[in-house]
Image: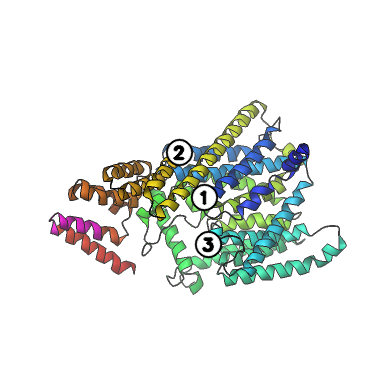
Amino acid sequence: MMNKIISLYYRCGYLIPLAASAYVPSMGGHPMHSLVVITALVWSLLILVREKKPCINGFLLIGGIYVLWTFLGLLYSLDKNHTCHELTLLITGFSYCLALQKHFTNNPAEKNRLIVFIVLLSLWKTAESLISPDGFVFGTGQWHTLPNPHVLGVLMVTGTLLIHKDLATQNLKIRTIKPYILILFSGLVLWISWRLNLYGTFLGLVIGHSIIFTFGSKTKKLRLIPLFLGLFLLLMAVWPSAPAWLQNNPRDPAKHERLTIWKNSIDYFLDHPVIGTGLGTYAQHYEQYQTLPGHRVVRYAHNEYIQIVCETGVAGGILAIAFLFVILKRIWQKAEESPGIFASILILIIWACFDFVFRADAPILIFSGLLAYLTAGKDMDQKEKTIVRWQNLARISLFSLITTTVLFSVMHGTSLVLHAIGKKHLNQNKPKQALPCFKKGFAINPLDAHLLYDQAVCLKELNRQPEAARKLQKALCLEPRDFWVRRKLAILHISLHGNETAINTYKPILKLAPSKPQFFKEIGDLYEWTGNKALAQKHYNKAAWLMKTKF
């Protein structure tokens, strides 16, 4: 019995994290994210351990170098906790793809099981969206059950496009109903995307079917249609008399915000051009360049390629482009053979130009699985160059990286559980019970500054202000660009050390968030309390000007 269970796990274990990823409640700030990462990495490790002579091909070499380069970002990252989180996603996707390549090469029949599973998962999520007003039967609603509603779109679009492959079986009855299922499914996805304002989903499905039509066609000249459309849209977007829906119009917040963020990201990149600021640090550094109105918090660039260059510099950008080139080169020759799978991969690559699809578990695992489907096979490996003397080094490095990532995910998930328990006590006005939970969580994951911040909140509630100030100071050492922690520390310094110390603590916030009028008004209050009315008025005027120009 146990042997059967183990054998079943080896054959189908890769489906577990894929199913769980469809219900991850947030972008990593939840224990379930750690569970998805651990299950995917453990299965990948078991598969890769059985490979006695790994082949070092271009995919592994360039992908491995890129992973190592982003790993070096830990040396200069100002938010190591978020850097580690992004690294876990990257390493998980890379390892999952390598393991599936080996698995599909040794078990070709398993390839179709992956496609069937993605299609069924997509059908299930689409049915949930129809049944539940919020979009989901299980979970707490569309915005809480998934990292972002666009992840729902990724599941629906890829599932629809994969029907082209999945239902092309020898069964005459299934082949007969395939067109009707495809039309019905496409219609439902289009209607849901329109109802939920998922324009990315709408465009993704339309472009995906266009790709299938052109690359699945025997007329090779039709392959130029997607390229022509892309160049046409790009030209119209920068044309002075472009249509209103292509211009940077503030009345269209989705498009206006993206174009503004991308423009601000240019200044971000120019300040850190060579090595960037470290993977996962975009949100911490972007505030300095933000020109969006109000209290808009920008955590992602809504363009994976812009964010990669900002976070990893020119070197990381070149490696990412090289890795993308290797991927496109390897899947291009399978376009006619598997147009649905090719279209799904290409749509995710295109989608990354307008959203943060690769910052969530489900799209990364789907992308890795489909990529492994097209690149698996001994015929492909034989064409790649094998470097024998580097095999052992590559194998040790890969296993060490996966093991380290698993350990971090275990610690991260455990600390998140303790954090959630502490938050529950704190919300019930029980700071004395919450404090030990936060302390234990920080002992397990000493990179999470939020645990120190919540310790400070508990200590302040218990009238232990000096200890609270020390915790906030320590939190600033972990995340020196977190202006909310700095603001909290400045407020504590008013009662502990006076207004002058509070002002010195508060001043850096003006450079970290120069577009926020709230901070100029508050430091103006501090100057007025010290009697320096001239400086107070100067900051009040600045706050008033920002309020006037931003709204």
At 58% across and 58% down in the image, what residue appears? Answer: 151
Q: Are marks 2 and 3 in contact (CB under 8 Å)?
A: no
Decide which of tag 2 and tag 1 comes sooner along the chain: 1
Per the rendering, the mark at residue 74 is 2
At 81% across and 67% down in the image, what residue appears? Answer: 177
Considering depth in this image, is 458 or 524 the residue closer to the camera? 458
Residue ID for mark 1:
28
Considering depth in this image, is 324 or 192 the residue closer to the camera? 192
Amino acid type at circle 3 is Trp
Neighbourhood count class around disc 1 (C-alpha, 10 Å): few under 14, some 14–19, many 20 upward: many
At 66% across and 57% down in the image, what residue appears? Answer: 344
Magenta range: 521-533
In the displayed structure, 527 sits above or below 89; it is below
Quarter of the picture holding the N terminus: top right
Query: Horizontal placement of 359 versus 519: left or right?
Result: right
Measured in 3D between alpha carbons, the distance from the residue under mark 3 to the one under mark 1, in whole angstroms, is: 14 Å
Decide which of tag 3 and tag 1 comes sooner along the chain: 1
Neighbourhood count class around disc 3 (C-alpha, 10 Å): few under 14, some 14–19, many 20 upward: some
Query: Horizontal placement of 327 versus 432: left or right?
Result: right
Numbered disc 2: secondary structure = helix
Q: Are marks 2 and 1 in contact (CB under 8 Å)?
A: no
Amino acid type at circle 1 is Gly
Front of the two marks 2 and 3 = 3
Residue ID for mark 3:
143
Neighbourhood count class around disc 2 (C-alpha, 10 Å): few under 14, some 14–19, many 20 upward: some
Counting from the top left corner in percent of width and height, residue 31 is at 53, 48
Considering depth in this image, is 326 or 100 the residue closer to the camera? 100
Counting from the top left corner in percent of width and height, residue 507 is at 25, 50
Decide which of tag 2 and tag 3 comes sooner along the chain: 2
Numbered disc 3: secondary structure = helix
Query: Horizontal placement of 409 versus 155: left or right?
Result: left
